[in-house]
Image: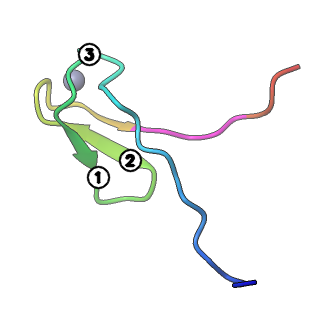
């Protein structure tokens, strides 16, 4: 077993604002920058359903 492996964080497939796929990780963790609409947003986990 390998301990301490980084948790893989899923990258969104497309921009939630314009729907384009030209996105890249932002400078800060969990932030993404859309190159089409130039929006910078944060993707964060809130809670499990229920
Ligand atoms: Zn966009």
Q: Main secondary structure of the magenta part?
A: loop
Which residue sits at x=20%, y=21%?
A: 20
Q: Is residue 27 above or below residue 22?
A: below
Q: CA distance from mark 1 to mark 2?
A: 5 Å
List the single residue furthest toward the left.
Answer: 36
- The numbered dot on residue 19 is 3
Residues tagged 3 and 2 counted as in contact (Cβ below 8 A): no
Q: Which residue is mark 2?
A: 31
Q: Position of residue 7 (x, y in %)?
A: 60, 64
- Relative to 26, does residue 38 appear above or below in the rendering? above
Q: Which stretch is magenta?
A: 42-46
Q: Earlier in the sequence, mark 1 or mark 3?
A: 3
Q: Which element is circle 1 on?
A: loop
Q: Please tell me whether mark 3 sits on a helix, a strand or a loop.
A: loop
Residue denoted by label 1:
26
| 17 lies above or below 38 | above
Asked if labels 2 and 1 touch by Cβ distance under 8 angstroms, the answer is yes
Measure how far apart labels 1 and 3 are at the Cα level.
17 Å
Q: Looking at the image, in which quadrant does ligand 1 appear?
A: top left
Label pair 1/3, CB-CB below 8 angstroms: no
């Amino acid at each position: 077993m390998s301990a301490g492996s980084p948790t893989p964080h899923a990258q969104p497939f497309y921009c939630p604002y314009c729907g384009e796929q030209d996105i890249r990780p932002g400078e800060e963790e969990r932030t993404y920058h859309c190159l089409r609409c130039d929006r910078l947003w944060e993707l964060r986990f809130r809670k499990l359903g229920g």
